[in-house]
């Protein structure tokens, strides 16, 4: 199997920078603020013919705060599940008490550990690593994550004792359906992810903004692969004060763009807010398949549930194509039925249909409701074909199709959606106007194109027919008077 490397260390020693360099990605947030990473972030890397999996973890601080304890538990769990642990320390700050405590925990796990002395650019390597021999975890190595110095030797040392498996030569398989879990802060996104996975995979804390990064977790359900992406809560722009919050919003937007299906989580105790509607509009604009999950449904009185149903029907009419599920992530009620809607939305987003079938659907829709007259003329729609997926895009060709009013375009969208059985995804209808076949033909009297007529040589201009002058009237002789 592919070896797993867990990156462990104190806050702000460069763990996320090392993760991004080893995976050649930007999946982990990197700022000067300590404690940005709180959950485990998984990425794939390759060195030569050797493949590996990197796991970035939160910083193990010296505080006893409850949130820090949860982050510490996640980091140590990642170390216990890994094949090799990369202990990252700060070569410029030197040895710290937190480094010694982490070393004690790692020795108890009994995992192979490679110490990476980071931020040593411009320093003497032997001097920078000398004091870290006291940790008793082998020979430290001086590296610089920001400048990619020493990373090749770091991987060679870390994987030197791991046997090369035949599976390492195989390409990384397709991860499967990517499902992004998005919503406002503290609506229960991380709780829903943990409930689906059946383990405490991401940090759950009763404070808004606990999740700051996008956490991708692959798993298999009923033989079908998925990737769950837990995202940071989407705040209003007026409430984004820290740079970390701004980056978290950017990462959430990127997760929506990369996802196949987006599950928008709403809080049943707060009804449908303007921020929820704005977030749903963002998903529709991105063209992603959509499932709506109304969380915290347990414990509500019958009259409160009736009110939520009315609010959803009233405020979410613009997403009437999406399924709405009422569930409780904390207790698990209603979570199992969520994947039926996810699978149907994913299938609709990647629907395949032949041009002939689409054209027949278009003909039936036009016959049932012809296009309206515009400036005394009617548009003629000729044929349709599939132009893309996720979202599905139907391209309709015709004469004067650009003159169709917006209500008729929406009618075509509804007719195509019903005929194709598309559910849970936006449908784009693109109208293309056919070119006029007579637009480039020259005008003339009986002449067509540049074809010569009669015995006139090719290229000679035809003679111009000048009008004949009017006949002159004869003058009467004088004797006739």
Image (cartoon, helix red, strand yellow):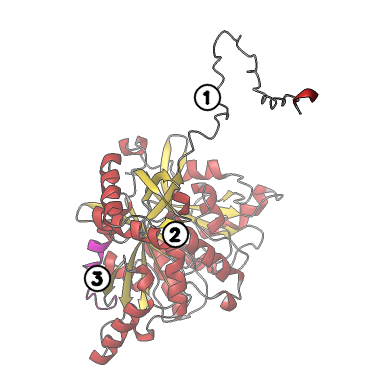
Dot 3, how many residues are within 10 Å of its Cα: few (below 14), some (14-19), or many (20+)? some
Q: Which mark is residue 335?
A: 3
Q: Position of residue 260 (x, y in %)?
A: 36, 55
Q: Is residue 184 visible?
A: no
| Residue 193 figure quarter | bottom left
Q: Is residue 65 magenta?
A: no
Q: Main secondary structure of the magenta part?
A: loop
Give the Cα separation between the discs numbered 1 and 3: 74 Å
Using residue 266 as the reference point, say whether residue 29 is left or right of it: right
Give the Cα separation between the discs numbered 1 and 2: 38 Å
Q: Residue at x 51, y 53 (%)?
A: 19
Residue receiving disc 1:
446
Q: Residue at x 45, y 55 (%)?
A: 376
In the depicted structure, whether residue 475 falls above or below residue 270: above
Range shown magenta: 329-341
Give the Cα separation between the discs numbered 2 and 3: 42 Å
Relative to the observer, which residue lies in front, 96 or 328?
Answer: 328
Relative to the observer, which residue lies in front, 51 or 376?
Answer: 376
Q: Is residue 60 visible?
A: yes
Secondary structure state at the residue bearing disc 2: loop
For the residues labelled 1 and 2, say whether their Cβ atoms are less than 8 Å apart: no
In the depicted structure, whether residue 205 falls above or below residue 149: below
Relative to the observer, which residue lies in front, 104 or 264?
Answer: 264
Q: Residue at x 52, y 45 (%)?
A: 154
Quadrant holding the N terminus:
top left
Secondary structure state at the residue bearing disc 1: loop
Residue receiving disc 2:
405
Secondary structure state at the residue bearing disc 3: loop
| Disc number lying in front (2 or 3) | 2
Q: Position of residue 467 (x, y in %)?
A: 66, 26
Q: Residue furthest left?
A: 222
């Amino acid at each position: 199997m592919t070896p797993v490397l867990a990156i462990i260390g104190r806050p702000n020693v460069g763990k996320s920078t090392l993760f991004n360099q080893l995976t050649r990605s930007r999946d982990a947030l990197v700022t000067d603020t300590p404690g940005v990473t709180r959950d485990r972030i998984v990425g794939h890397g390759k060195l030569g013919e050797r493949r590996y999996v990197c796991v970035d973890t939160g910083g193990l601080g010296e505080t006893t705060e409850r949130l820090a304890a949860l982050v510490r538990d996640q980091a140590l769990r990642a170390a216990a599940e890994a094949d090799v642990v990369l202990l990252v320390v700060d070569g410029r700050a030197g040895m710290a008490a937190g480094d010694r405590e982490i070393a004690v925990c790692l020795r108890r796990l009994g995992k192979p550990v490679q110490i990476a002395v980071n931020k040593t650019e411009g320093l003497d390597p032997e001097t920078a690593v000398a004091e870290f021999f006291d940790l008793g975890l082998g020979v430290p190595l001086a590296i610089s994550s920001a400048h990619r110095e020493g990373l090749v030797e770091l991987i060679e040392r870390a994987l030197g004792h791991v046997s090369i498996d035949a599976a390492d030569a195989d390409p990384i398989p397709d991860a499967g359906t990517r499902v992004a879990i998005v919503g406002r802060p503290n609506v229960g996104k991380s709780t829903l992810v943990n409930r689906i996975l059946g383990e405490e995979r991401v940090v759950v804390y009763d404070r808004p903004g606990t999740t700051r990064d996008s956490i991708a977790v692959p798993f298999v359900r009923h033989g079908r692969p998925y990737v769950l992406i837990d995202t940071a809560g989407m705040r209003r722009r007026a409430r984004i004060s820290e740079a970390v919050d701004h980056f978290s919003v950017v990462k959430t937007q990127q997760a929506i763009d990369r996802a196949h299906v987006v599950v928008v989580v709403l809080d049943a105790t707060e009804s449908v807010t303007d921020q929820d509607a704005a977030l749903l509009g963002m998903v529709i604009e991105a063209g992603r398949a959509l499932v709506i999950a109304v969380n915290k449904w347990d414990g509500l009185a019958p009259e409160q549930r009736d009110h939520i149903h009315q609010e959803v029907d009233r405020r979410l009419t613009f997403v009437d194509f999406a399924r709405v599920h009422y569930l409780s992530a904390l207790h698990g009620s209603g979570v199992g039925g969520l994947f039926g809607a996810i699978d149907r939305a994913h299938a609709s987003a990647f629907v395949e249909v032949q041009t002939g079938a689409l054209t027949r659907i278009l003909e039936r829709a036009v016959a049932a409701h012809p296009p309206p007259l515009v400036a005394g003329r009617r548009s003629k729609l000729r044929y349709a074909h599939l132009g893309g997926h996720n979202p599905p895009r139907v391209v309709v060709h015709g004469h004067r199709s650009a003159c169709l009013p917006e209500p008729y375009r929406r009618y075509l969208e509804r007719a195509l959606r019903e005929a194709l059985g598309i559910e849970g995804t936006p449908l784009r209808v693109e109208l293309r106007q056919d070119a006029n076949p007579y637009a480039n033909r020259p005008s003339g009297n009986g002449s067509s194109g540049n074809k010569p007529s009669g015995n006139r040589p090719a290229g000679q201009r035809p003679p111009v027919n000048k009008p004949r002058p009017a006949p002159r009237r004869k003058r009467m002789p004088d004797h006739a008077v």
